[in-house]
Amino acid sequence: LIFKYYLLIMDLKRCSVCGFCIYPGHGSVLVKNDLKIFRFCRSRCRKLFLLKKNPIFLRWTSTSRSIRGLKINLKNNFLIDDNNSFLYLKKNYNFFLTLQTLYFYKKMGKIKYNRKIDFKIQKLTTK
């Protein structure tokens, strides 16, 4: 098959407390009654948010580090702030490479299945 080279965009969200990246399918979301959305990368951040801790005074958060002049070496450290109080980070990835890996996963599944059948046949013939 001939695939065209595409670049698709994967949405990486930012944690509402520490500011680190949250990949799709990870973290947790808290939606308040006024429809404000808060995203958390780990349970530590969620617990600190529910305890109403200020991220500026937590030494390990990116906001605290940037205020103290210890910026974290992340691309696009300060990004566009959405109305819902979390930051968007767009990351490009190669669509062709993704399709190729999925194709090889299918191929590996067939190989594993064939090996399993061969093993069962070999086991039956030795008895």
Image (spheres, grey):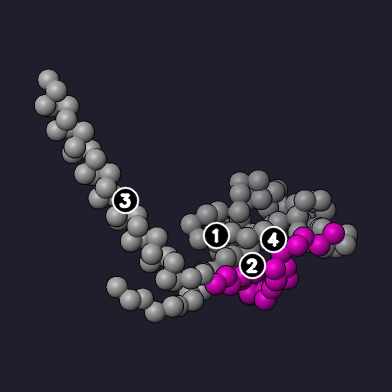
Return the disc, 2 or 4, that comes first in the chain's sequence: 4
The residue at 12%/20% (across/down) is: 127
Q: CA distance from mark 2 to mark 4?
A: 8 Å
Q: Is residue 94 above or below residue 48?
A: below
* Type of amino acid under label 4: Gly
Secondary element type, mark 3: helix
- Using the numbered discs, state the Cα–Cα distance from disc 4 to disc 3 in whole angstroms: 38 Å
**Residue corresponding to mark 2:** 86
Q: Using the image, determine if residue 25 lies above or below residue 5.
A: above
Dot placed on the residue nearer the N-terminal end, 4 or 3: 4
Q: Is residue 12 left or right of residue 70?
A: left
Relative image position of residue 95 (x, y in whole percent)? 44, 71
Q: Is residue 80 magenta?
A: yes
Q: Residues within 10 Å of mark 4 (few under 14, many from 20)?
A: many
Depth check, mark 1 against mark 4: the one in front is 1
Q: Amino acid at mark 3?
A: Met
The mark found on residue 19 in the picture is 4
Amino acid on which the number 2 mark rests in the picture? Phe
Separation of disc 2 and disc 1 at Cα?
Answer: 13 Å
**Residue at label 3?**
108
Question: Between disc 3 and disc 1, whose residue precedes?
Answer: 1
Answer whether residue 52 is visible to the viewer in this image: yes
Q: Earlier in the sequence, mark 2 or mark 3?
A: 2
Horizontal side of residue 119 vs 80, given as left or right: left
